[in-house]
Amino acid sequence: MTASHSDAEHSWLLPPEMLENSPSKAHGLDEKTYRRRTAIFIETAGLQLKFPRLTIATAQVFFQRFYALHRCGVPVVQKRTAPPRPTAPGPT
């Protein structure tokens, strides 16, 4: 039985086949190094900001979970452009 992307969004336990076939791996990215370095960065920043260890660990878990479902290194939020400004009507 294969779990779908939407099933994984509602469960904290991800099936092994989903972890083995993550979006980053599908695009040939070095996911392991990226995730490890980012987890270390989260820990270092959290310690410097004097956050509780539980808060730091929670941030690391959320980070790992997010990138199990999304591709590493790709902005999730797309840049929005402002709508065109209306121009004043010209003389007729």
Image: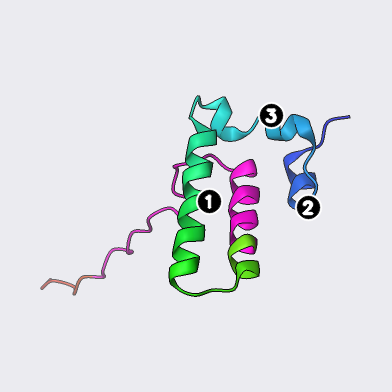
What is the secondary structure assignment of the residue under circle 2?
A: loop
Q: How many marks?
A: 3
Q: Where residue 73 sits in the image (x, y, percent)?
A: 44, 42
Residue range in magenta is 58-86
Disc 2 residue crowd, few under 14, some 14–19, many 20+, Cα 10 Å: few
Question: On residue 39, which mark appears?
Answer: 1
> Taking 65 as reference, is 23 above or below it?
above
Cα–Cα span, label 1 and label 3: 19 Å
Residue pointed to by mark 2: 12
Report the front residue among 56 and 71.
Answer: 56
| Quadrant in the picture for residue 1 | top right
Cα–Cα span, label 2 and label 3: 16 Å
Cα–Cα span, label 1 and label 2: 19 Å
Disc 1 residue crowd, few under 14, some 14–19, many 20+, Cα 10 Å: some
* Residue under the point 54% across and 74% down: 51
Question: On residue 64, which mark appears?
Answer: none
Report the front residue among 63 and 46.
Answer: 46
Disc 3 residue crowd, few under 14, some 14–19, many 20+, Cα 10 Å: few
* Residue under the point 73% across and 41% down: 5
Q: Where residue 80 sits in the image (x, y, percent)?
A: 38, 58
Q: Is 87 displayed left or right of 3 in the figure? A: left
Q: Amino acid at mark 3?
A: Glu
| Quadrant in the picture for residue 21 | top right
Q: Is 62 displayed left or right of 71 in the figure? A: right
Report the front residue among 54 and 13.
Answer: 54
What is the secondary structure assignment of the residue under circle 1?
A: helix
Q: Amino acid at mark 2?
A: Trp
